Image (cartoon, helix red, strand yellow):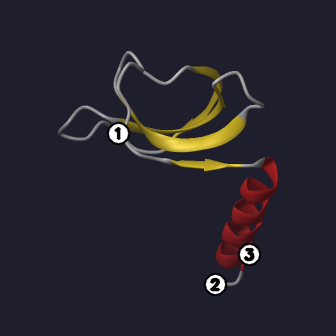
Amino acid sequence: MTNFEIIETLAVLSERDRAGFQKELNVISWGGRKPKYDIRGWSDDHEKMTKGIILSEEEFIKIAQAGLESIGGK
């Protein structure tokens, strides 16, 4: 099993699906390394997870800026 620590939950992005997973944006330290931004589905107890995406701070900022520009451009 992968060693991880959820440092902070920043947002719940979706309600639980039929399999019981809730998509969250968290700051997570994987294997004791520097915390990164993480988007994936989690079970209630955070014991089970779906595949997800892990982003550095720089990648997260670029995505956030692109999203804000996209919304502002409409």
Image: 36 above or below 44 = below
- The amino acid beneath tag 2 is Lys
State the residue position of label 1: 15
Residue 57: mark: none
Q: Seen in the image, is 4 located left or right of residue 29? A: left
Q: Are marks 3 and 2 in contact (CB under 8 Å)?
A: no
Query: Which of marks 2 and 3 precedes in the sequence?
Result: 3
Q: Secondary structure at mark 3?
A: helix
x and y percent of residue 45 in the render? 38, 15
Q: Are marks 3 and 1 in contact (CB under 8 Å)?
A: no
State the residue position of label 2: 74
State the residue position of label 3: 69
x and y percent of residue 42 in the render? 39, 31
- The amino acid beneath tag 1 is Glu
Q: Residue furthest bottom?
A: 74
Q: Seen in the image, is 59 located left or right of residue 23? A: right
- The amino acid beneath tag 3 is Glu
x and y percent of residue 35 in the render? 73, 32
For the residues marked 2 and 1, what is the alpha-carbon distance in whole angstroms? 27 Å
Q: Secondary structure at mark 2?
A: loop
User: How busy is the neighbourhood of tag 3: few (under 14 within 10 Å), some, or many (20 plus)?
Assistant: few
Q: Nearer the viewer, mark 3 or mark 2?
A: 3
Query: Which of marks 1 and 3 precedes in the sequence?
Result: 1
Q: Nearer the viewer, mark 2 or mark 1?
A: 1
Q: Residue furthest left?
A: 18
For the residues marked 3 and 2, what is the alpha-carbon distance in whole angstroms? 9 Å
Query: Which of marks 1 and 2 precedes in the sequence?
Result: 1
